[in-house]
Image (cartoon, rainbow, N blue to C red):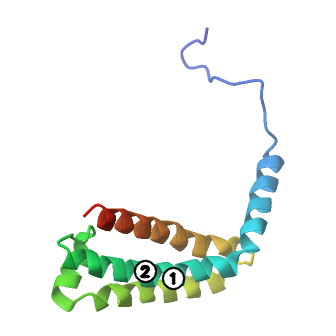
Amino acid sequence: MVAEGDVFTTDRTVPIGTIDEWCSALLDELAAVERELWLVIAVTLIVDVWLTHVGLQHGLHEGNPVMRAAIETFGIAILGLTKVGVLGLAGLTRQLLSDQRGVVVPLGLALPWVAAVVINTVLLLSL
């Protein structure tokens, strides 16, 4: 029984060094495939813009309200230009980080952009 105000603890402890070592090893593994992550980003940028264009032609709507307004005002090219701008900013940010920690930049773009391509593909296939 735990009294009010007591902190629940467990007898299982993990040394902080172990977590740091695990994270460091994971970052090292990701750093080994950083070039491939940038390639995934480039491909998904192109595919996402194309799929969005196709989806809009088939009556689907852009999910991001800001991007939806921009596309309605300036056309689909603004989506590509925005993504290229994000890619450029990511590249600059990557240059400021160490080799090991910098891999989080392409990973942070690759994951949501791949998810967007998968979602757009599923939506288009369901038409």
Residue 116 x %, y %: 41, 68
Q: Secondary structure at mark 2?
A: helix
- Determine whether, in the image, residue 97 is placed left or right of residue 63: right
Which of 14/116 is in front?
Answer: 116
Query: Quadrant of residue 75 in the image?
Result: bottom left
- Residue under the point 51% across and 82% down: 43
Q: Which residue is mark 2?
A: 47
Query: Quadrant of residue 64 in the image?
Result: bottom left
Is 54 situated above or below 123? below
Q: How many marks?
A: 2
- Determine whether, in the image, residue 38 is placed left or right of residue 57: right
Residue 68 x %, y %: 22, 76
- Residue under the point 46% across and 71% down: 113
- Name which residue type carries label 2: Val
Which of 125/70 is in front?
Answer: 125
Q: Are marks 1 and 2 in contact (CB under 8 Å)?
A: yes
Q: Quadrant of the N terminus?
A: top right
Q: Which residue is mark 1?
A: 43
Which of 27/123 is in front?
Answer: 123
- Name which residue type carries label 1: Val
